[in-house]
Amino acid sequence: MRWSPGRKAHVVTAVEQGLLSIEDALRDYELSLEELEAWRRDFKAHGIPGLRSTRVQIYGNRRSTAAVAQQPAPLGTLNAITAKNPNPYTPPG
């Protein structure tokens, strides 16, 4: 089966909206969990263009800045920031 970016987006959207379970998507479309998760990640980060087979050539094999920004800061870092400025809405002074 040829997987166009639009077909991949259709499956990802159906899974994301709960119209298709992950298990059904894996079975019905003969996908591995890793493949489906990569599609979901790439679609979230780059939209339909991220689902092109040449995506690695275009975007590289790096994590998106959105994915990095969503990761929590290490607890030590948060504690140090809060100790210096307990109210994040006022500048440290």
Image (spheres, rainbow, N blue to C red):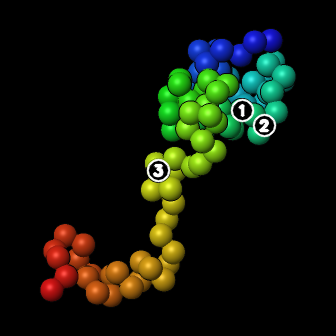
Q: Give the residue at mark 1.
A: 36
- Judging depth in this view, the residue of 53 and 40 nearest the camera is 53
Left or right: 28 in relation to 21? right
Would you say 43 lies left or right of 77 here?
Answer: right
* Relative image position of residue 33 (x, y in whole percent): 78, 37
Query: In terms of secondary structure, where does tag 1 sit?
Result: helix
Q: Residue at x 23, y 77 (%)?
A: 87
Q: Are marks 1 and 2 in contact (CB under 8 Å)?
A: yes
Mark 3 residue type: Thr
Picture quarter containing residue 20? top right
Give the spatial CA distance, label 3 vs label 2. 23 Å
Q: Which residue is mark 3?
A: 65
Q: Secondary structure at mark 3?
A: helix
Q: Secondary structure at mark 2?
A: helix
Give the residue at x 50% y 28%.
47
**Residue 10 screen position, x and y as percent:** 60, 17
What residue is drawn where x is 60% and y is 42%? Answer: 60
Question: Would you name the residue on which mark 2 appears?
Answer: 33
Residue 13, quarter of picture: top right
Amino acid marked by disc 1: Leu
Please provide percent x and percent y for residue 42: 59, 35
Q: Which mark is residue 72?
A: none
What amino acid type is highlighted by mark number 2?
Answer: Leu
Nearest the eye: 54 or 29:
54
Callout 2 crowding tier (Cα within 10 Å): few <14, some 14–19, many ≥20: few
**Which callout, 3 or 2, points at the residue further toward the start of the chain?**
2
How crowded is the residue under tag 3: few (<14 C-alpha within 10 Å), some, or many (20+)? few
Q: Is residue 58 above or below residue 64?
A: above
Position of residue 91 in the picture relative to residue 43 (left or right): left
Whether residue 66 is visible to the viewer of this picture, yes or no, is: yes
Q: CA distance from mark 1 to mark 2?
A: 5 Å
Is residue 23 depicted above or below 66 in this figure? above
